Every structure is written in C-alpha cells, then in structure tokens.
Image: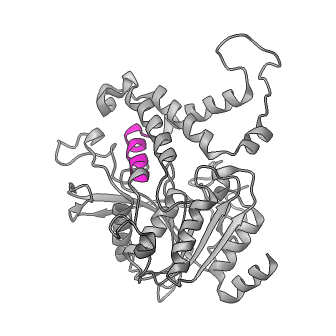
Amino acid sequence: MSFSSADSVGLVTPQKYAFEAPLELECGRVLPRFELMVETYGTLNADKSNAILICHALSGHHHAAGYHHAEDKKAGWWDACIGPNKAIDTNRFFVVALNNIGGCSGSTGPVSPNPENDNLPYGPDFPLVTVRDWVKTQAMLSDRLGINIWYAIIGGSLGGMQALQWSVDYPNRLKKCVIIASAPKLSAQNIAFNEVARQSILSDPDFHQGRYLEHDSYPKRGLILARMVGHITYLSEEAMKQKFGRDLKSGKFMYGFDVEFQVESYLRYQGEQFSRNFDANTYLIMTKALDYFDPSREYEQSLQKAMANTTCRFLVVSFTTDWRFTPQRSQEIVDALISNHKPVSYLDIEAEQGHDSFLFPIPLYVKSLRAFLGGEQHLAQTKEAV
C-alpha cells in the first residue's frame, strides 16, 4: 500500500505537547513536568464533537496510521482500521493517538532527561505509572485540545483497559467506549507471564540495575526473551500451526540447539527486532501497569459498582481464539454493565489470530466497529446482519 492510497491518511507528522504543571501519580511520586507525543488524523469540526481517542497496547505508540515519510514502508500499527472510509473514518472523525508517559516513543519516560538529575536519562528512577495515571494525562491532553467530550474512546488489550478506566473516571467526557480483546483485570496466569518477561530483563547482566544507558549498553538478551514469551501468548495455537507447523528451516534435523524449526526462527527474529526498538525500563513499567489495573479496587472489589456511574454506550469485542484475554473476561465487563442497565453491545468474533486478532481487518469486526461509530441505525442494521 502506498502512502498516497485513497484509503490512507497519507503522510503524518507527530506533535509533542508539553505540560509544565507537576503531575501527581498513583504511586505517590510526582513528575515535575511531562511531554506527550501525539498524532492526529482528520479534521476537528467546529463544535469539537467528532473527536476519537485511540489508546495503545503494551508495545504500541502514537503512530497508529499513515506514514512518516515518502519512503516509509511500514504504516501505523492500526492503519487497517484508521483512514478515509475505513472503520474509523477520518473523513468524518478527528482521530487522536498518543504515546503514554513511561513510553519510549517520544513521550516522557525512562529514556527522557530527568530535570532533577542534571537532565541525565531517568532510567530506573522513572516512577511506576498506572492506567489511571495514563487516563489522567489523556484528560489533560483533551483539555489542551479543547475537546470536552470524546465522540468515542477506543482501545485494544491494554488500550481497552484505558478506555474502560475513562468510562469510570470521566463518565461525562465520552459518548461511546470501545473495549477490544481486553479484561477488567489480569488473571494470575497473565501476571505470571509478565513476571517471567520481567525477570528475563532484570537478570540480564547488561541490565545494570536499569542504568544500561550510562554503560552504553542495553539488556538485549533479556528483551529478546521477554518478547518471545509475550509473542507466544499473542498468537493462537491454530495461527502458529498454519503459519509454521513443524516446518524445519533446513528441511532436516541438525541435532543441535541452533534454530531448526521455522517457529524458532520467527520468534528469534521478532525478539531481535523488538530489542532494537523498545526500551527495557519501559517494558518493565508497561507490564506493571497491566498487573496493577483493577478499576474495582476502590469499589469494594465490585466491577458492577465501579461501572455504576458510566453514561456512555459500550461496544465490547472479544475473539474466540484469544487465550491471553479470553472471551469470558470480556463477558465479565458486559455482565457488570447489564447489571447496571447500561447500553452495551457485545461481539465474540470468530478469528484464528489469537489475541493479536484486534489488529487485523476481520470483516465482521470491522463492520461492527464501523456501525457502532456510525450511529444507532447503522448498529441496528449490523445486528440484523449478524
């Protein structure tokens, strides 16, 4: 696909927004200032009623659609759904995507200069942040943009958790909430996967207690292992079977411990690429934010009570082969909303790609997302079609 295609937002330029007021975090620490890297697509209308916020997942960032330069071969991570005449139609909507604080793609995070330490990189001194902290900064960005009410807030996986937190913390600031392949809190198994990934980084000799930048190094092996573990959980068994099966790279057993199976080659390649582009301290922070997420924590451990004051319409989407965030976890959200007599539509989409399904333009998924954003009449038509 060319950046000049009719269904692409084309060339985009990120913008950095600086916030000079101190930011109090849930962990009790304060960021003296922070910056958010943001991309926007489409045009904000006169009354600022057509804005959609996109919340990213664990390794995501602000570059959700389009291209950064004419030779750019890789579009934004959700380009399949954001653009002219796509599910999130930039002919109709003003779409905002950002990199959360604690990230490593331009927003204030561990690689940023610490104004309280001679502007050396924060490194391990960057505070742990939570989903609620992210939503708080997103609300501050909303104020900066002059957007009082979002037409919709959308997120997949960890992004879906942010959308859910928005509906709880700022119930009157969004009309529609789309929660995709997500959960109301992590299971013990998911926390365990995150801990294995973190330990692979923490135990790497090149981690240097998080001060690897000062040693002109980084925990490459730890990041590779962390990504390999994570990537396995993002794919379904069927997806791995269809993509790799038991195919051998050389066509025969080599009787050694080097790469022999195609799936091994794929995982090592993914890990290698990830280790070059993602900060280890950021990975630790993001996985901890996942572990800590639980909007019911301040509501007597009741998700129903946590969502009692929501005012928006909800679309909750799960995928049949997602074993990281199973459909049952999405149904917990739906049940809490139904118990509160809140307007919610739920779809469990048949898909082979596992947890990563939310990134693919699966026809029913795309059609349903488009219909939900298009109004009640379109949504009713989709229900009839299903």
Residue 249 in sight = yes
Q: Is residue 148 above or below residue 6?
A: below
In the rendered image, residue 114, in percent from the top left (x then y), is placed at 23, 46
Q: Is 270 contained in the magenta span?
A: no
Q: Is residue 114 above or below residue 305?
A: above
Identify which residue is drawn at 59% across, 67% down. Answer: 331
Identify which residue is drawn at 27% across, 42% down. Answer: 122
Of 23 and 176, which appears nearest the observer? 176
* First to last magenta residue range: 278-290
In the rendered image, residue 41, in percent from the top left (x then y), is placed at 55, 69
In the rendered image, residue 144, in percent from the top left (x then y), is placed at 35, 74
Q: Is 282 contained in the magenta span?
A: yes
Identify which residue is drawn at 70% across, 31% down. Answer: 263
Identify which residue is drawn at 29% across, 30% down. Answer: 209
Of 53 and 385, which appears nearest the observer? 385
Q: Main secondary structure of the magenta part?
A: helix
Residue 41 in sight = no
Horizontal side of residue 287 vs 209, given as left or right: right
Horizontal side of residue 344 vs 187, given as left or right: right
Identify the image's colour scheme: rainbow, by chain, secondary structure or one colour: one colour
For the C terminus, the quadrant is bottom right
Residue situated furthest top in the rendering: 255
Q: How many marks?
A: 0
Of 355 and 96, which appears nearest the observer? 355
Quarter-wise, where is residue 142 in the image? bottom left
For the N terminus, the quadrant is bottom right
In the rendered image, residue 198, in percent from the top left (x then y), is placed at 42, 36
Quarter-wise, where is residue 381 in the image? bottom right
